[in-house]
Image (cartoon, rainbow, N blue to C red):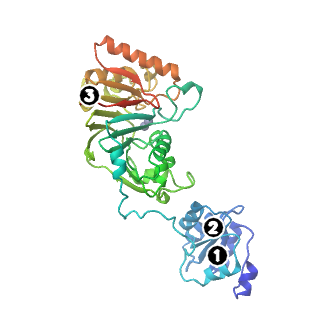
């Protein structure tokens, strides 16, 4: 490369590593810096950042990163670090000289082809006709906190939160935990060749509720529409949280590079419609911004409250340094009454019930419900069917089963009519209130 440049009339200073390269650059103030990406002591990104952040370096040189890495993420990251061009090795002398003759940078950076986000969305009429009668719910991930594959979770499943709802021509996905991967595979197989349209409702952006999204196959096909809806997080917006989990060095494909017709909508109102399905959201008691959703379909209603800690139980808990006043408890009770109203008379309620009552005592303030409270809320609210959900990663199949049995006993003790089951991967519930 040196010879090529010298033969073309350039004067060249050579460095054997990144850090010495930066020193030489500061000393010689070159017009152009050609740097490798993978070098000892100081890599190409660091070289770019060191030069770009050096305010005394004016005018700034042009930086050309050369690398044997053919990954799109490495190109993008180089540009983000301050490079003007990225050339893939081996580099032909003519190619390098050509780039140096060009006025502007980023000549060799090509955007990954994808559907322009402003273009009109694909036609999904076929898909809409194919789904939605009668409405149904299917569990793809029922676990809380972290995925737990293995022998001890075979029955209920180890994937984190993801539920599919098909109703009235809409495919609605509740949360994008690791379960969404299998859902994506199923959809791709079922509608192969036909554009599909999915609305994903996000309860909150804790890992166990979003981590599967980068593996959601339908988002990689330009013919599909994927709409993600949720509320702004505690620190940054929904879009930035979702895309940051796909940033390098966490993931090789950025969200912008996903070829699907992707839209992220930050919700403001607590009531909205997805087609004919009415959706209501309510804030949950959980660290950060977390909501539960209630969906009204033609076949009945579904409430999804994956992460929540009832206020009363939390405020009743003995806290060493402050006595719980009557006012505090009355307030807490009011908050829980709001939740009861939210799920009142619901056909299917999918509710956090991560702990048993004994475990809860050592998890006060963790943002989750104990099964006794989940049952109490469901009985008071007269829900028809309760699914215990967000199973603790430490609970094996036998434990989950025994919690469901205990929940059924509690319902009987209280004279309620709630049907209780522990949510299980693969289980499908058909909503047929109209025909019942
Ligand atoms: Zn969770
Ligand atoms: Zn959470």
For the view shown, which residue lies furthest in the top direction?
413
Q: In the picture, residue 74 is in which quadrant? A: bottom right
Side (left or right) of 253 relative to 70: left
Q: Residue at x 53, y 80 (%)?
A: 104
Q: Secondary structure at mark 1?
A: strand
Label drawn at residue 340: 3
Residues at badges 3 and 1 in contact (C-beta under 8 Å)?
Answer: no
Q: Tell me which label, 1 or 2, sits earlier in the chain.
A: 1
Q: Secondary structure at mark 2?
A: helix
Residue that carries the numbered disc 1 in the rendered image? 33
Cα–Cα span, label 1 and label 2: 10 Å
Which one is closest to the eye, mark 3 or mark 2? Answer: 3
For the view shown, which residue lies furthest in the bottom direction?
9
Residues at badges 1 and 2 in contact (C-beta under 8 Å)?
Answer: yes
Q: Which quadrant of the figure shows ligand 2?
A: top left
Side (left or right) of 161 relative to 62: left
Which one is closest to the eye, mark 3 or mark 1? Answer: 3
Other-residue count near label 3 (Cα within 10 Å), few / some / many at <14 / 14–19 / ≥20: some
* Camera-side residue of 191 and 333: 191
């Amino acid at each position: 490369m040196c010879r090529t440049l010298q033969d073309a009339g350039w004067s060249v200073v050579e460095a054997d590593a990144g850090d010495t390269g930066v020193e030489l650059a500061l000393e010689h103030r070159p017009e152009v810096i050609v740097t490798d990406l993978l070098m000892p002591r100081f890599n190409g990104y660091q070289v770019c950042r060191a030069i770009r952040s050096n305010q005394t370096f004016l005018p700034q040189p042009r930086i050309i990163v050369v690398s044997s890495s053919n990954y799109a993420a490495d190109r993008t990251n180089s540009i983000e670090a301050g490079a003007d061009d990225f050339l893939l090795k081996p580099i032909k002398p003519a190619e390098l000289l050509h780039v140096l003759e060009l006025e502007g940078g980023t000549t060799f950076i090509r955007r990954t082809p994808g559907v322009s986000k402003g273009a009109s969305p694909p036609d999904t009429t076929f898909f809409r006709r194919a789904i939605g009668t009668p409405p149904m719910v299917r569990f793809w991930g029922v676990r809380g906190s972290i995925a737990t594959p293995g022998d001890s979770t075979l029955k209920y499943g180890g994937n984190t939160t993801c539920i599919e709802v098909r109703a009235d021509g809409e495919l609605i996905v509740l949360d994008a935990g690791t379960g969404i991967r299998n859902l994506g595979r199923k959809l791709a197989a079922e509608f192969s060749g036909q554009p599909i349209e999915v609305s994903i409702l996000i309860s909150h952006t804790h890992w166990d509720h979003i981590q599967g999204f980068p593996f959601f196959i339908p988002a990689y096909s330009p013919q599909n529409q994927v709409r993600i809806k949720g509320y702004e997080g505690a620190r940054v917006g929904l879009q930035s949280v979702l895309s940051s989990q796909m940033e390098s060095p966490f993931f090789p494909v950025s969200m912008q590079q996903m070829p699907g017709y992707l839209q992220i909508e930050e919700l403001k109102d607590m009531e909205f419609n997805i087609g004919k399905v009415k959706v209501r959201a309510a804030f949950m008691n959980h660290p950060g911004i977390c909501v539960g959703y209630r969906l009204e379909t033609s076949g009945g209603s579904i409430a999804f409250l994956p992460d929540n800690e009832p206020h009363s139980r939390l405020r009743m808990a003995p806290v060493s340094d402050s006595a719980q006043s009557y006012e505090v408890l009355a307030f807490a009770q009011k908050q829980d009454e709001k939740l009861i109203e939210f799920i009142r008379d619901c056909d299917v309620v999918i509710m956090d019930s991560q702990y048993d009552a004994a475990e809860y005592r050592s998890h006060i303030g963790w943002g989750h419900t104990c099964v006794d409270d989940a049952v109490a809320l469901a009985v008071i609210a007269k829900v028809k069917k309760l699914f215990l959900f967000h199973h603790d990663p430490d609970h094996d199949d036998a434990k989950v089963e025994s919690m469901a049995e205990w929940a059924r006993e509690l319902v009987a003790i209280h004279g309620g009519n709630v049907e209780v089951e522990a949510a299980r991967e693969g289980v499908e519930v058909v909503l047929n209130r109209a025909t019942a």
